[in-house]
Image: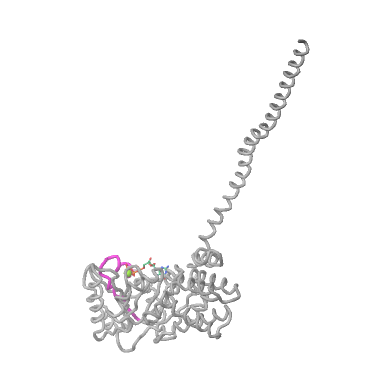
Amino acid sequence: MIALWIVLAVVVLVTILVSSVALSRRASRRGPESAAPPPSAPTATPPPAPPRRATPPPAPPRRAAPPVPAPPQPETGEPPPPAVAPTAEAPPPSPTVAVPDDGAGAEVVAPADLRDRMGKTRGVFSGYLRALRGRGSVDGQTWDDLEEALLRADVGVATTTALLEDLRQRVRSGELRGPDAVVAALRAALRASLEVAGGVDLRFEEGVTNVWLFVGVNGVGKTTTIGKIARRQVAQGRTLLLAAGDTFRAAAAEQLGIWAQRADVGLVRGAEGSDPSAVVFDAVQRASARGQELVLADTAGRLHTKVNLVEELKKIRRVADRPPGRVTEVLLVLDATTGQNGLTQARQFLDAVGVTGVVLTKLDGTAKGGIVVAIQREFGLPVKLVGIGEGPDDLVAFDADRFVDALFE
Ligand SMILES: Nc1nc2c(ncn2[C@@H]2O[C@H](COP(=O)(O)OP(=O)(O)OP(=O)(O)O)[C@@H](O)[C@H]2O)c(=O)[nH]1
Ligand SMILES: [Mg+2]
């Protein structure tokens, strides 16, 4: 019996021992599992988090940078910023000089001026050219860059396509090799497309009262241009009168009156709403009676309808052409900052009043200087003068060589 109790006690003891060992093993396995999650979740994530927060700051600088070189490609990040900045601050110095010798009324300017004032256009253009040259070979990217540069400078789709198609063929035929040759050929092609019959001289005839009419939509710079030209003509020894043919607003005649005072010339004006052709007719009569040889006639840029405006301009022209008057220039004034849209607006004037040339204003305030090429190519009209600022001397004769040099150098 005692032996039986001993056996039972041993069995019980062994059972207790075995189960306690099993429990302790399970506990040791669960230990690492339950300990792991806390460190892994919160601890592992936070450390990466700060670095992630540290990264964003670099991002804003990257976003802040593009606006400056915005004109060219973001990747090139080229020179436009430096070019743009000087332009914005450039207006004060105006080394323009009137040269009273060419007898046709064109003004000559110190070479640096047009170049400096065209800083925005140059910035766009030269950025692409530099990137393109830097790649060393002519590939698909070359054509993309050239196309973008020309379109951004507002050379226009039609002109850009024609220019590039020609260059592509010359590269295919082996005539042009390498980016430098392509750029040089583009430069020559642009220069050639600026060759328009007639030249930039403003036409003036002896023995009649010359009338130069200024037409264009409102705000393009007609009145300002007249003021600038009046000063130059006086400096060249011409005698002249201003005609306030914009009778649509009284303020227009007052604005022209200020320019007349500055140039020390007479002004003929009518009442607000009066017939502008009567004002121009009167100006021609007075100029002739005083032996003055030139009338600069302002016109309205806006009327109730465009049909009215065009009809009114036709009438002004007819009246101004009656002897002793002779219309020797009809200058279409275009605002370079409006780019291709400006061309669309301007077409209505072309046939209606027999435009003889273009004055392109505000070339200083735009990166769309390529519009000069589009105007000459699409309108077949010479750009005779360009406005490069609001100051009285900020008007220069358009010089195709200097213009192209400014784009490429
Ligand atoms: N930056 C710059 N501004 C110019 C230039 N030419 C004219 N402006 C400015 O353009 C604005 C409009 O010029 P206006 O001469 O009044 O234009 P307009 O065609 O006579 O306008 P409307 O009489 O309203 O038809 C003015 O603030 C001028 O100073 C230029 O070449 N460069
Ligand atoms: Mg005006």
Instruction: Note whether residue 113 is visible.
Output: no
**Residue 236 to residue 255: above or below:** below
Residue appearing at x 62%, y 47% in the figure: 51
Please tell me in which quarter of the rendered image ligand 2 is found: bottom left
Q: x, y (%) of residue 191?
A: 48, 82
Farthest front residue? Answer: 1
Farthest right residue? Answer: 3
Quarter holding residue 320:
bottom left
**Residue 178 to residue 389: above or below:** below
The reply to whether the magenta stretch includes residue 139 is: no
Residue appearing at x 62%, y 35% in the figure: 38
Residue appearing at x 73%, y 22% in the figure: 17
Quarter holding residue 397:
bottom left
Farthest top residue? Answer: 1
The reply to whether the magenta stretch includes residue 240 is: yes
In the figure, is residue 302 to the left or right of 381? left
The residue closer to the viewer here, 78 or 35, is: 35
Q: x, y (%) of residue 336?
A: 41, 71
Instruction: Note whether residue 61 is visible.
Output: yes
In the figure, is residue 380 to the left or right of 8? left
Q: Which residues are magenta?
A: 239-257
Residue appearing at x 24%, y 71% in the figure: 270
Q: x, y (%) of residue 176?
A: 55, 83
In the figure, is residue 90 to the left or right of 294? right
Q: x, y (%) of residue 409?
A: 55, 76
